[in-house]
Image (tube, rainbow, N blue to C red):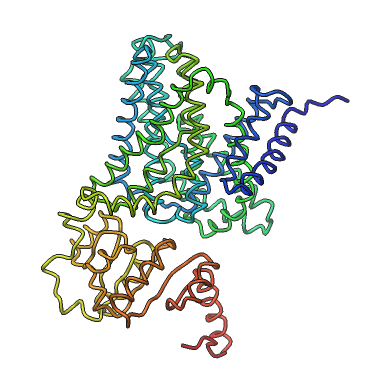
Amino acid sequence: MPHDTALISTIAYALVLGLVFGMIAVRLKLPALIGYLVAGMLIGPATPGFVADVALAGQLAEIGVMLLMFGVGLHFSMNDLLEVRGIAIPGAILQIAVATLMGMGVAHLWGWSLGAGLVFGLALSVASTVVLLRALEDRGVLESFNGRIAVGWLVVEDLVMVLALVLLPALSGALGGHVAPDAGALWPTLAKTLGLVAAFLIFMLVVGRRVFPWILWQVAKTGSRELFTLCVIAAAVGIAFGATKLFGVSFALGAFFAGMVLRESELSHRAATETLPLRDAFSVLFFVSVGMLFDPMVLVNSPWHVAIAVAIIMFGKSIVALALVLAMRYPLNTALTVSASLAQIGEFSFILVALGVSLGLLPQEGQSLILAGAIISIALNPLLFTTIEPAQAWIRKRSALARKLERKMDPLAELPTTTEHHRLTGQVVLVGYGRVGRHIAAQLTEQRIAFVVAEQNRDIVEQLREDGIAAVAGNAGEPAVLIQAHIARARFLVIATPDTFHVRKMIETARMLNPAIECVVRTHNVEEAELLRKEQVGKVLIGEEELALGMMRCVLAGMGKPDPVKD
């Protein structure tokens, strides 16, 4: 009997060609996602040969977005989100405003209407969460302070875009487009949207964080791995779908908050592990689906328009973000990481332009330009991350203004003059004040051991100083930060942050200033731990190993056996 195989053929072609061209890209020393984009172009409607179902591919990509955002939520607590609100909220809103004005200005020069310029500018202003997460995960900095800022920034962007998607139909008539049949008055529509978003957040934080972890635990007690995996995926997709249908929140945000509430469960690590293969497979489908939308003829018909759109995406809004982060007195490395993170556009941009075209606000050319800008920026974005360290060195060497903005006249860059110097002899320099750092600080306080905290989050540093704890703001990979923490007179350097990229620099600087200092390093990466141990940097601890060791000590103590660990 005949069968409709559109779904099967779309998945088969996408995954097989994604694998082939992903391998070719890696062999050419390029990011694998470039290969996925090329695979999408080959099976898209703009190229000859097999044409996959674009609508089906788009829905598969949405599942990938849900699973990826759910996985991020499993590693991202509400406290992490609140810690970066001081920079993420004002930074994201100002960056969206400036990038939107850039897009509107260019659209005005092209003779487009005000409504077209607004949609075009908004689409250029919002970055792709999927692309950002892949870039941060590939570099192992997703859980670092810079990674948390970038993710928090994009969460704010997503919330702003949710409002934009709801308000555009209400404003369409005034902006020169069609009046949507279901468009209501502006203020009631805005009040309803804000109310629904607030209701969703309250529901997830008050009800969800108690109910969903309990359900996960009940399923785990059955002992069935299949049911556990099914429960995790059902939670991710089901909550995301329900959030969209009931509260008008995007799939991505719904899945993100689903992961955050399930993080309250002790089984969150297992949940993340179980969904990893599916997340990877469906994220490939996302990039393939983006490639399918691309029409190469736009590069021939409107090359200069494409170049301008790409320039705004990759340089315009990134420079704005760089200036905003530096103006808020955050380190240069943080500013460069955030600016590189925003140098692309993705899923929300496609939704915006589709709505703009359907409302008669945006010409078809605008949609083609956005898609071209997305393809080019997504392909080039990973390369920008490789330029962060060289750019940081160049800026510091050439730009006196950047150095001044970053450290000079910064009240949190130096210890207060009221700090008792006799307390800072033989002290501990604690790098990072996250979940692990807080426990260490509490134990040091209980044992009455003096310590100085080096932390990149300025809000935390301010709070620590209000509590009477010595702290300096900045990246401890920079010599100036460790010097201000009085590393020369310290006894121990304890690195409690998962930022593995700067560990060697921290230790190298500390030992240059204090050859006798002892170092204790935290890492989640086994390969990194082995490398650090070979370099004899000090005591290197891996979270999983220490957990296993603690559990074995409990077992051995209960059996009357001696502790096998020797000091």
Q: Position of residue 425 (x, y in %)?
A: 21, 80
User: Which quadrant of the view contains residue 152?
Assistant: top left
Q: Name the image quarter holding residue 127.
A: top left
Q: Residue at x 70, y 38 (%)?
A: 17
The answer to whether residue 248 is above or below residue 75 is above
Tell me the quarter of the picture where residue 225 sits: bottom right
Is residue 196 in view from this perspective?
Answer: no
Q: Left or right: 310 with respect to 26?
A: left
Q: Nearer the viewer, residue 206 or 67?
A: 67
Residue 233, percent across and down?
61, 45
Q: Residue furthest left?
A: 418
Residue positioned 72% across, 40% down in the render: 16
Q: Is residue 111 left or right of residue 216?
A: left
Query: Which image quadrant: the N terminus?
Result: top right
Residue at image location 48% in from the left, 56% down from the top: 140
At which x and y percent is residue 236? 56, 43
Determine whether 4 is above or below 326 in the image.
Answer: above
Q: Is residue 262 visible?
A: yes
